[in-house]
Image (tube, rainbow, N blue to C red):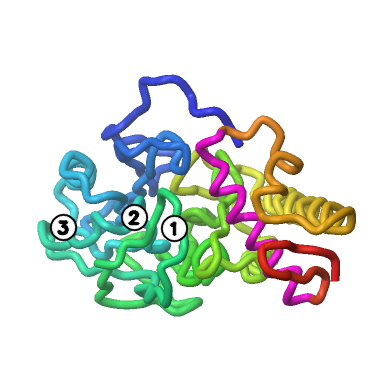
Amino acid sequence: MAAIPPKPWPTGLVERPEPLVARVLAPNASPYTFTGTQTYIVGTGDAVAVIDPGPDDADHIAAIISAVGDASIAAIMCTHTHRDHSPAAAPLAKKTGAPIVGCAPLVLSDDGPRLDASFDTSYAPDRVLEDGEAVAGPGWTLRAVHTPGHTSNHLCFALEETGALFTGDHVMGWSTSVVVPPDGDMGDYMKSLDKLYAREDRVYYAAHGAPMEKPRQLVRGMMGHRRQRENQILRLVGEAPRTLPDFIPLMYKGLDPRLDEAAQMSVHAHLIDLERRGMVRCAGEHWSAA
């Protein structure tokens, strides 16, 4: 996990990492969002797409509208429905008349832990994109890539004209993605990483952190990191039964205390996946080798 860089951050300013892509940083920095959510604007013609409009913040919504300029918004596209990604979709749609297109709404079946980035229950898309479906405008095509794991409804969006992939929180430019059960699923997350590794994208643009210009190398490293975590867990439960909090000081040296709960949820996701595969078992609050 990278340290948050010192201020000033380019909050509200328009940056252009490549000709078809602009981004605007939202003012919602936190230990879970790095310097904030990056909203992307795709296209330079008279109709553009807005990806991950971010939190419902009046200044950020005004900055998006200013960045769009005289163009119309053909689609407001959300990768998933954590509250740092999608709540601005509804007010932006109301102001511009643009449709909300992208991931499916998420219906939660319990009141389990949600950490800082809890779910946006108000999200109501006009159109849900299935894997492989596309939205297009003048000079741009964005195709949905279904990547469950961080959340069950997570999508990435591939910009076919340039080989860029907007990865939301599935692959980030500053940290590994947090997978929080029950909606987050480590088995699905690993399958989605395999799916991205099989692609030939040129660059990843995440909602948090810098662009990633060697994506397949990065994904290979991420898969290796997750396997290393699995091996740590298997070694620790092989030594003695352990409760969830027991794993954290042994696996995450020097962890920011504010991220302790996130680390526990990530370990829990690994344990659930390993239990499904018959490699660990749980008795009460204690996990042990199967």
| Mark positioned earlier in the residue sequence (1 or 2) | 2
For the residue carrying disc 2, how many other residues have a C-alpha within 10 Å: few (<14), some (14-19), or many (20+)?
A: some
Describe residue 180's horizontal placement relative to residue 103 as left or right. right
- The image position of residue 129, as x and y in percent, is 40, 76
Residue flagged by tag 1: what amino acid is it?
Arg
Badge 1 is on which residue?
Answer: 114
Q: CA distance from mark 3 to mark 1?
A: 24 Å
Element marked by disc 2: loop
Q: Nearer the viewer, mark 3 or mark 1?
A: 1
Q: CA distance from mark 3 to mark 2?
A: 14 Å
Element marked by disc 1: loop
Query: Which mark, by number, is residue 185?
Result: none
The reply to whether the magenta stretch includes residue 260 is yes
Residue at x 22%, y 59% (from the top left corner): 73
Residues shaded magenta: 257-277
Question: Residue 83: which quarter of the image?
Answer: bottom left
| Mark positioned earlier in the residue sequence (3 or 1) | 3
Query: Which mark, by number, is residue 91?
Result: 3
Which of 206 and 54 lies nearest the eye of the viewer?
54
Q: Quadrant of the N terminus?
A: top right
Does residue 170 appear in this view? yes
Magenta part, dominant SS: helix
Describe residue 96's horizontal placement relative to residue 147 as left or right. left
Which of 120 and 244 lies nearest the eye of the viewer?
244
| Mark positioned earlier in the residue sequence (3 or 2) | 2
Residue flagged by tag 3: what amino acid is it?
Pro
Residue flagged by tag 2: what amino acid is it?
Arg
Badge 2 is on which residue?
Answer: 83
The reply to whether the magenta stretch includes residue 29 is no
